[in-house]
Amino acid sequence: MENNNVKENKGLSGDNGFGKLVLLTGLWGGLIWSFIGQIGYYFHFTKIAPRVVLGPWALGSWKNGWLGTLVAIVLIGIVSIGASFIYAALLKKRDGLLSGIIYGVLLFLLIFFLLNPMFPGISPFGAIDKNTLVTSICLFILYGVFIGYSISWDYRNRGES
């Protein structure tokens, strides 16, 4: 009888809620770290605001105000869900902080080198000032550690390794 209840309560995709955790980790990771990025922009640690993601797609001056910032933070949270599922698929069995740090650095390199032409609000890599560069890479590393450690910790503690 108990065995049937365990099977019924497995949640998303029969994985005992692991997929739901990955989704929520990605959403909250994107919301939290893009909000902290906005704080860094406000205090002039970086010249890149989260609303830079709206540049290629949104028209109008609204994207440069508080509404654009709010929409950008939510959009980053939604896109972050995909990043967390990629981490879960590739690296969930990895222990420690190093895999999260590496994941954050890889995301930084992806955005600042490969996807840079998509975002006109981000200067070419060689033209970015040191404060913006250091702040950005630190935010990406912290984001990667948040995603990586949360997902790996939950995966290990569910006994699914």
Image: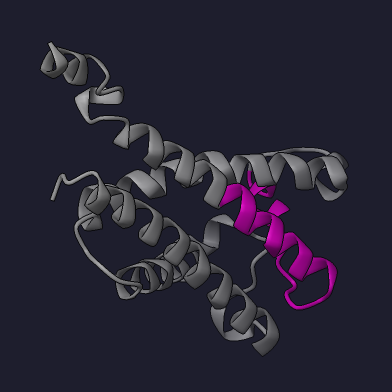
Q: Quadrant of residue 19?
A: top left
User: Would you place residue 96 above or below residue 72 in this image?
Assistant: below
Label count reads: 0
From this viewpoint, which residue is outermost toward the bottom? 130
The magenta stretch is: 30-56
Question: Residue 153: horizontal and vertical position, in percent?
Answer: 32, 56
Q: Answer whether residue 88 is magenta in the image.
A: no
Residue 36 location in percent, x, y? Answer: 69, 62
- Dominant SS of magenta comes to helix
Report the residue at 33% width, 44% height from top.
85
Instruction: Find residue 42 and report its horizontal and vertical position in percent.
Output: 84, 67
Taking 5 as reference, is 143 left or right?
right
Q: Is residue 121 rendered to the left or right of residue 17? A: right
Residue 119 as seen in the image, left or right of residue 112: right
Residue at 65% x, 89% y: name it. Answer: 130
> Residue 111 at x, y = what percent?
48, 63
Front residue of 36/97: it is 97
Q: Is residue 13 above or below residue 143?
A: above
Residue at image position (30%, 22%) is: 11
Query: Is residue 31 shown above or below 149?
Result: above
